[in-house]
Structures are given as structure tokens and as C-alpha cells.
Image (tube, rainbow, N blue to C red):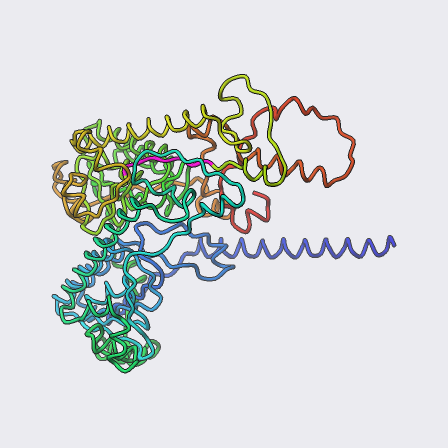
Amino acid sequence: MMGFARVIWKLLVGVKDVLVLIFMLLFFGVLYVGLRGTPDPVIDGGVLWVDLDGVVVEEPSAQDPIEAALMGSTLGEWRLRDVVAALRQAREDDRIEAVALDLDGFLGGGTAALSLVADELEAIREEGKPVIAFATGYSDDAYHLASHASEIWLNPLGAVAFAGPGGNTLYYGEFFDRIGVTANVYRAGTYKSATEPYTLSAMSPEAREDRERLARAMLGHWREDVEAARPAAQMELALMNPLGMIEAANGNVSEAAVRAGLVDTLGTRAEWAEKLAELGGEDREDVFKNTRLEDYIAREVEKPNGRVGVVTIAGTLTDGTGGEGTAFGSSLADAIERAHRDDKFDALVVRIDSPGGSVLASERIRQAILAVQEDDIPVVASFANVAASGGYWVAAEADEIFAQPETITGSIGVFAILPSFEGTLEKVGLNADGVATTPLSGEPDLLAGPSETADAFLQAGVDDVYTRFLTLVSQGRDIPVARLEPLAGGRVYDGGVARQIGLIDQFGNMDDAIARAAELAKLDDTEVVYVTRESDLGWLGSIFGASARSDVQADPLAALNPAPRALIEQAIADVERLLDGPVMQARCLECGPGQPVAAKPARSPNWLGRLLGL
């Protein structure tokens, strides 16, 4: 028996040694690649191959090199300003004969962002350089770009199908009723519908009205741009009667797109490549002589170093710290404050593509921006696809706000939501009971449900923040509160309406905002310096899952009950102890939980972090 145990032990030790060896080889392999770097890309000219696999974003997420090496390629993210700058450079580059717009695998980027790319495609065509688009399937965003090409190619087995804005959302109200969960909602704003899925079984009339109005406006902006680019296309037929369009072509889906003027040519990828070879020259490997977009960005797009600072806020605003591609309030505010201290800029542009999120994260960033303004440095906000709710909070007191007609903004409202499980306990025969020394003892109670006092306290907190939101918007945009209130309440607007009611100042893109910031600062040029976040560990931090951290219980309402998650964990632990059997214990049931148990920070560790228990 002992001999068998030794064999098993040796086997386990051997497996451990092999795993350690594999990890060390991976680690030093990646370290070698990182230190060695990659050779400078060669620009061959010919056709600029814009192969937009993935999405176009304001700020790509930091990539974990170990995970990428093990898991293969991840979703591609193209920085909007890099794509725009590359196309702008290619327009003047005599080596570039044409542009190949490869949209197979393109997943979108939003109407406001893609309109900037579309403008550059038009400028390239005006310079006399053809833009040839290809895809197996075109939907809204892909066709938005393709409509600005000289020729649109479609795979003979492909299709053009437009979905338009809209879609369904899950509503949990009836499900929560069945399992006894109560979604306690505290909100300010009739149109603040973000909490409805947790309390209703269908959309409220107010939310439906708001969403339909916004969807119609966004479809109108998209359609206006596409029809201007391709006036011969039968967009009404394609949008509202796609089956009729196909029937008119005897059921041939791709031919229907040709007959409706949506595409110019049906052809395979190989035939498309031959067309590009005629324009840019032949190449033995890729058929047509080409320069890939990523190489062109790396080699040709200049890294500016001027006096107009640009900080990007992209994603859901969250308390805590994190790297690029996230919108953690502390990191963004720290980056602004550090650049300000180091005298990196004389004007600041805040580029926002965020639906909002944490109030505290929004306020943390706003305070950093106010500190810049207090030193007489102008701040201009530039809205991308979305700058709403907390995203608008951040920009409300900027000197000027630029947006595009397709931008989604507004949503001036506040909410909080707290689940409680009194119904669930009743269904399974459990009961929560205890003692209280103040009206807020043990509140908000997730087990028995929050008391009337707790309910009133939480609602008062939400109302107070909403009042503050109205005040800062009123002061920042010079709109009296009495006129602002009916425009707020959580209502969402497209950029066109937002300009009419005073929530934005001017239509304009990122370049316009930069030019205005330079003008306000009386600068001679508009060269920019990008305000970036620093990481103590760099990419090594991402290996151990330390690249993102949520601040623990920063919200004042959350501080009322510092560890609601701990109550649920305690209940699970009690059940586990029961399953352990009749174990003798010396434990004080009346002493309560003792010191509050801090919730674990949300670090989102990757595979290695989980393996090491980080």
C-alpha cells in the first residue's frame, strides 16, 4: 500500500513539475517577444487593405499577451482616430493607388463614429483614388461604410439585410414574482427606464415612447447619410419590404441587392482581388499589391506631441482603477490630474463614448476636469456615439460641448436598485428575525426586505443626487432648472434634438473640438497630446488579473450596509455546515457577524490569476 502511495505521489510531483516548466517556457517566451519587439512594417504601396475584422472603438482594451498566446486571436478592436488618420494620410500618399474596404468580419462601430470614417472614404474618392468594398453580408454598419465606396462588391452567395435600430430586452418582473425576489427600485426621472426590466413584465408606455422616438431618429440619420452616398439605391424597399425585394429577383437574394441598387457587382473574393490587382499591381502572395491597415497605422500615422490634451472616456463608468479600454473613474481622474500637474497641455478635449454608470466615478472625473478649468485652461467635450447619463454628468460644465447629429445623449436621471429575498424565504419556509437599536439597524435588509425607513432613506439619496445633477447641468449649460426639468427625467435624445434644447452647443467631430479648444486657449496649432493612464505593472499586471480593481464600498448608500453579499454567503455557509454533520462547535450565535466583511474587489482575474488564486 505504501509503495502504491509513493508511486501516486511521484506522479503528482511529476505533473506539477511539467506544469511549472510549461509556465516558465510561456513566460520567458512572451518576455523574449516583448523585449525583442517586432520589425518595422514595410510599406509596399499599391492598395491600402482596410480589413476591419472586429469593431471600431474609441479606445481599444489592453490585451493580455499570455491569454492571447494560449487562446488565439481575440476580437479585433480598431481605434477610431487611428483608422481616420490612416485614411487621411493615404489620401495624400502617392504610393497608395486605391483602398480595399474588406468588410467580411466587420462587427460595427456606431453611426456617429463610422460617419467620420465615411467622410475620409469620400475624401479619398475625391482625390481620384477608387475605394472598392467587399463583403459576403452587409448589414447596417458595414453598409454605412460601403455606401461611400466607389464600387460595392457582394459575394454571389451573400446578402444585404438591414435591421435598423431596435430589438427586445428581457423583462424579469414575472420571473422574480415566481421565485419570490423583490427588486427594490429607487429612481428619479419618469423616463429613467433602466430599472424596468427588473420590475415589469413588459415595457412601460413612457419607455416605449422614448425608445421609439430615439430609434426613429437614429434610423433617419443613418438613412440620410446612406441615401446621400447612393441616391440610386431603393432604400425604402430594402428597409421596409425586404421580402418583396427578393421576390422581385425570383428569390435570388444577392441578385435582389443588385436590382435594388444596393451593390454594384456580384463576385467572389478571388475576383475582387483580381480587380484590385488591376488598380494597384499584382502580388504573388496576396494577388494584389497591398499595404495592410495595421502596418500603415504603425509606420505612417504620426504620434502627435502638442499642447491640446485629449483624454478618452469610453465604456461604463465604474469606481476604481483600470487600464485602457475601461472607464474606471479613479484611473481617468488620476491621468487628467497627473498630466495637468506635469503641464502637459494648455487646452483639454474630453472625448466621451459612455452610457454612464457610477455617480461617484462620474463626479471623480468631473472634479478633475474642474481643477483644470480653475487654472484657466479651456475644456471642450466631444461626444462620440453615446454620452448619456453619467457620461453627460462628466461633460456638463465643459466650456463647450460638440456632438454629431447621430450622437445619443441626455438621460439626465438617477436610479439605484436593491434585490431582496423575503418572498423566496417564505416559499421555502425560512424566516429572518433579529433585533434593532436604530431605525437603520441591519438595513437595507436583503433577507426580510428593506424597512420603510430604509426605503425612504435610499429614495432620499437618489433624489438628492438627481437634484445635484440638475443643478450642475443648469449651471454648466446656462439652462434654468425650471426649463431643464421637463427635458431631464431620464429622457434620451439624438444630437439634433439635443442641440435644439441646449444640451450641446455645436455639431462637430473630434477635429472640430480640438480646433475649438486650441482657439479658446489661443494656441497657434492644434497638435495634440493624448492623456493616457499609467500602470505600475504594465502588461504583467494583466497576467495576474490586477489590471482592473473596483473601489470597495465607495458609494454612500452602499456604506449603509457594508457587505450585503456577505449575508448571502453566510446563508450558503450555514447550509454547508449543516451538511457537514453533527460537528461540535463553540460559537456565539447572539454575537452577530462581528466586524463587517469587506466584499472582494472586482478584479476579473484571467486564467493565470484564477490558477494562482488571485
Residue at point 46% right, 31% down? 553
Give me the residue at 27% from left, 71% from top. Answer: 242
Magenta segment main secondary structure: strand
Coordinates of residue 241 in the picture (x, y in percent): 25, 69
Residue 582 in percent (x, y) is at 78, 36
Q: Residue at x 42, y 51 (%)?
A: 170
> Which residues, given as a range, are shown in magenta?
412-418
The quadrant of the rendering that contains the C terminus is top right
Residue 282 appears anywhere in the view: no
Q: Is residue 410 magenta?
A: no
Q: Is residue 417 magenta?
A: yes
Residue found at x 29% / y 65%:
139
Is 521 or 614 nearer to us in this picture? 614
Front residue of 37/288: it is 288
**Which residue of the protein is positioned furthest toward the bottom in this rendering?**
250
Q: Is residue 246 visible?
A: yes
Q: Is residue 122 left or right of residue 422?
A: left
